Amino acid sequence: MAEAQNSRILLESGTNEIEIMKFTIGGNLFGINVAKVREIMISEPVKPMPHAHPAVEGIFKPRDAVLTVVDLPKYLGMEREKDPKDIFIITNFNKMFIAFRVHTVDRISRISWTDIHKPDKTVSGGAEGVATGIAQCDGELVTILDFERIVAEIAPETTIQMSEVENLGPRDRNEKPIWVAEDSILLSKMISDSLRKANYVNLQMFPNGRELWDALIALPKDSDISRHVALIITDIEMPQMDGHRLTKLVKDDQRFKHIPLIIFSSLISEEMRIKGRQLGADEQLTKPEIGHLVDVMDHLLERAAEAQEK
């Protein structure tokens, strides 16, 4: 049975599809990756917390765990009088469980990542925006919110910390080319700044898996690939092409399969680990463990160098 289950998971991996749960706030349609959702429930009374971020409504205890409630309408500037029929979306990512208040929940749609487009800066708000993509679902336009960006603003201590890299101490300069696919503007900058702080100075950042893959296949066929890219780091959730699809393409290609590839995502769970492992990922790490990421990069690059010498 376990074998059959793993086969099913593998068949569902690398297809470049996503399930979007649609919800409304003030009549506007938004979306969240179903992989981030653990439960949907009718809103309950919330205990306010002093000195919290204005968008933090407070805490409640649905069963055996105390959860923080984020008032998403208030955060987005669409606040109205709270209704007992409001919905709590209980999420799990970055090893955290957080409840988000929304007005209604619509159905789930399965779409291709190619149907999700990066919003124009006038819509997303540029680097400060929380719209990570615009999707066409069942004939409707849905704004996909960057929940990692929202939580990073509300609780900065829960996201990537430069101090983890500083604690590694002095490091030698490393000029090996590192390619990174990350769609969040905020997290892309955090990752780039952290890796440069760790003395990885030859970084190329891509806003999604599609652009990284296009750059990879454009490399000269008769060249030493390791001179152009020595290691790939990819998020999972990205418009146009997700990290699982990118991993599958890289590891199925004779030219590129030797390139060490790390999946660095807030969505790493046991099921996701099975998917990534079946697709050939060399390592899978949970955001925001940037210090661990640097350690793993050191190890994989050293291993790749030893393999080349043999």
Image: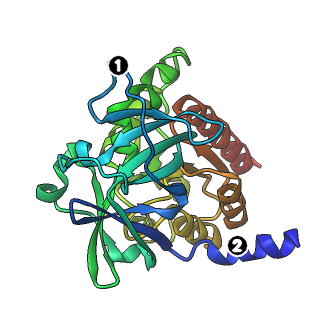
Q: Position of residue 298 (x, y in %)?
A: 61, 35
- In the picture of the structure, the residue carrying the numbered disc 1 is 50
Report, in whole angstroms, how far the alpha carbon at label 2 lies from the one at label 1: 46 Å
SS assignment at label 2: helix
Residue 220 seen by the camera: no
Q: Is residue 130 visible?
A: yes
Outermost residue on the left side: it is 122
Residue picked out by circle 2: 10
On the image, the x and y values in percent for residue 93 come to: 53, 46
Amino acid type, label 2? Leu
Relative vertical location of residue 144 with respect to residue 230 in this rendering, above or below: below
- Viewer-closest of 109 and 249: 109
Q: Position of residue 26 (x, y in %)?
A: 21, 59
| Left or right of 70 in this view: 280 | right
* Residue occupying image coordinates x 72% and y 46%: 309
- Identify the element where label 1 is drawn: loop
Of residues 299 and 70, the one drawn nearer to the viewer in this rendering = 70
